[in-house]
Structure formats: C-alpha cells, structure tokens
Amino acid sequence: MKAVHFGAGNIGRGFVGLLLHEGGYELVFSDVADALVDAINATQSYTVREAGPGGVNRIVTGYRAVNSKTDPDAVADEVATADVVTCAVGPTVLRFIAPAIVAGLARRSPDLAPLKVMACENAIGATDQLRAEIEKLDPSVTDRAAFANTAVDRIVPAQPEGGGVDVTVEPYFEWAIESTPFAGDLPSIPGAHFVDDLGPYIERKLFTVNTGHAATAYFGAQAGHVRISDALADPSIVARVGAALEETSAVLSAVHGLDPAELAEYRATILERFRNPELVDTVQRVGRQPLRKLSRNERFIGPAVQAAERGLSTSALVAAVAAAVAFDDESDEQSVELQRMLRSEDADVLTATVTGLEPEHPLFDAVHEVFAARQEELRTL
Ligand SMILES: NC(=O)C1=CN([C@@H]2O[C@H](COP(=O)(O)OP(=O)(O)OC[C@H]3O[C@@H](n4cnc5c(N)ncnc54)[C@H](O)[C@@H]3O)[C@@H](O)[C@H]2O)C=CC1
Ligand SMILES: O=P(O)(O)OC[C@H]1O[C@](O)(CO)[C@@H](O)[C@@H]1O
C-alpha cells in the first residue's frame, strides 16, 4: 500500500505521515521546499516526539520525498499508483497541488481501486475544495477517486531551526474522517475515527480548538505576549477566551444538539492542551493568516453568524474579532494586507470583503463597529 502526502511540514510529518506509516503505507512526501525534501531523503527514519503527559517517541520509517516544484511529473507518477493521497499544505495552497493529482489520476490504471483523497487542513469541506480545484482542471478524472472530508486535531508548533526532520508534537490527537465516500473500503489509519456525518465533528473542532487557540493568540499579541503559554497565564485573557468558547459551545448545542456538559469538558481539556509547558508555541504562529481566520465560514465569523441568526450572544466572539483585526505581524503577508486595507478601505468595504457579511445580516453592525474602531485607533497612532 502506498500513500502520497502533499506538505511535509509540521502536521504532515508530525501527524498525517506518522499515522499513515503506522497504518502500513509506504509513504511518499511531496513538498516544494528544496531543503526539506533533501533532508527527508537524507534520512531513513525520523522521530515524532510527543511532549507532555503520556507522550512517547514514535519512529517513522519507509518514506521518501519528491520535489513537486522541480519534478511534478514524478509526483504524478506516484499519485497514479497510490492508494491514498492526503495533504496538509494550507487551504490557500490546494489549487497548487491539484494539477499533480489530476495528472496522476489521468495516468491511473482503470484496474486500480479509486484513489482515496483526504485533505487534512483546518477548514470546513477542505477535501470538497480540493475536488473542486481538480474538477476545474479535468472533470473526467474525479470518478477515479473517493473524496472524503476530514477534521484533524493535533498541536504541532513550529520546529526549532536545525532540528532536522524530527518533529515535536503534543501527545493528543483526533482525526475524524467521512466514511461514506469509501463505500466500505476504508483506508488503514489507526486511531482515526470514521463517521457518517462529519459536520458536527469539524464544527466542534474548528469552533472550539481553533477559535480558542486563535483567540488566545490575538488577545495575547495585543497584550504583548510572545508565547501562547504566557498569554494563558494572564487571567483576563483566559476569561475572554473562555467567554468566546461559551458562545461557540452554545451554537454547537443549538445547531448539532451537542451536550453542554460534554462541551464544557471538551473546552477545559483544550485549554489544558494549549497550556502544555513542554510545547513551545507562539502567538505569531497560531495567529498566522488573519484574513483566512476572519473569513465567513471560519472560526470567528462562522459561529458568530450562527449565533446571531439564533439570537444567541456574540459579544465575546466580536471581541476576539477586534483583537484579530489588530494583529500586526510584518512577517505575515495576510496581516500586512489586513493592516493595509484598514488604512485604505472604508469600514463598509472592509466588513464585506474580509468577513463576507451582508449589510442586512444581524452580525454586520457589530463587526462593522470593530473595523471602524480599529481605523479610528490607527488614525490616532
Ligand atoms: N500545525 C498544526 O498544529 C496543525 C495544522 N493544521 C493544518 O495543516 C496545514 C499545514 O499546517 P502546518 O503543517 O502547520 O504548516 P507548515 O507550514 O509546517 O507545512 C506546510 C508545508 O506545505 C508545503 N507546501 C507549500 N506549498 C506546497 C505545494 N504546492 N506542494 C507541496 N507542498 C507545499 C510547505 O513547504 C510546508 O512544508 C494547514 O492547513 C493547517 O491549518 C491542522 C491541524 C494542526
Ligand atoms: O493554519 P491554522 O488554522 O492556524 O492551523 C494551526 C492550528 O491548528 C491546531 O493544530 C489545532 O488543531 C493548532 O495548533 C493551530 O492553532
């Protein structure tokens, strides 16, 4: 059995690649970072170090890497004969990996079982997005694959310079995968959780883990903290993050019928995970790409829209949006773009462009106020 995984970064090596290896797949990483591809090919094994209570070292073997920038043809050949394709490249990069998958599917023998395709990005319907990119290029190849959405959860921070291919992760993980697209022929992924309806799982994860983590990052950055653990040592930040998560939990209960007591436990576990003293993580990494995080279906506006439409409270989520709007990291392209837009667009345009909210939406005015206030603040700086 062979799996091709696009994106040999933190989650690629520290989670998806590890579980595919443990599931018995020969593993082919595909990445565009020359040095990373070379480093992977220079090793025969790497260690995934689980830092924190109960963590152990896991060894990954039986892999190689192909450079999809310099050798796209070789990647397509690997895809053509693979059983599984996964990716963890970031939602905005899905369109760039689609051509190699299309070329691989076009070359695939009709005798082979459908290629199992699973995008492992923090986004609702990431595999659907990848499928749409593939269809745009060649609609005739999609019947050679089974496309399943997934929800992946494991904190894998940026790795220290010079650490090689090894990767430090938290001990916890959860990987929920839609089962129906596979028609009974499930991929071999130990510990993965196959579900008929992924909706509640991905929303529970994105609107709790990712809302909470990103809110911690934005409130933390505003208060001048560098590390996530420092931000969570500040009781006022804990209170604000907790309030935002109570609002998302109320939405999850109202929309998916999730049990409030179980959600309260889930929230507490997650805050403990963020506090893991053995995992060095920064507000800069967790806050990265604020424009993506402020978009309509993402971790802040997504649940706030659903709350506003049900007459539920949104003030804590709106406060997190205000902190996100102030996130100013000159090394992050989206943060630079957001700050540029704040200086040059009016608040109506900003609210609509960044969040996708329509002026008549019940959330619009509160978010508009956030953008206008930040603009006012910038004028006085
Ligand atoms: N790090 C984490 O804790 C988690 C990350 N995720 C999601 O996983 C995705 C990746 O995140 P990270 O691993 O943290 O980022 P990362 O930056 O460590 O890894 C991304 C990798 O993709 C590669 N890449 C970029 N363009 C490519 C292309 N066209 N073809 C092949 N490879 C390409 C990059 O060179 C890099 O090695 C994101 O969608 C993120 O939201 C999901 C859960 C946890
Ligand atoms: O690209 P994003 O959405 O910031 O993804 C990384 C996030 O996902 C998480 O792993 C949670 O699963 C967090 O570590 C991190 O905040």
Image (cartoon, rainbow, N blue to C red):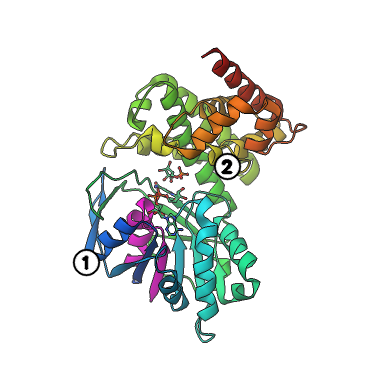
User: Can you tell which quarter of the image residue 378 is in?
Assistant: top right
Q: Position of residue 6 (x, y in %)?
A: 43, 61
12 inside magenta stretch: yes
Residue at the image position 30 percent from the left and 68 percent from the top: 63
Q: Which residues are magenta?
A: 1-22
343 inside magenta stretch: no
Residue that badge 2 annotates? 298
Q: Is residue 196 left or right of residue 10?
A: right
Residue ranking furthest to the top: 380
Q: Secondary structure at mark 2?
A: loop
**How dense is the environment of label 2, judged by Cα within 10 Å: few (below 14), some, or many (20 and up)?**
many
Q: Secondary structure at mark 1?
A: loop
Rendered position, 15 above or below 321 = below
Residue at the image position 51 percent from the left and 84 percent from the top: 109
Residue at the image position 64 percent from the left and 65 percent from the top: 136
Nearer to me, 115 or 261: 115
Q: Say whether residue 283 is visible.
A: yes
Identify residue type, mark 2.
Glu
Residue that badge 1 annotates? 44
Q: Position of residue 135 (x, y in %)?
A: 63, 67
Identify residue type, mark 1.
Gln
Q: Position of residue 275 (x, y in %)?
A: 34, 34
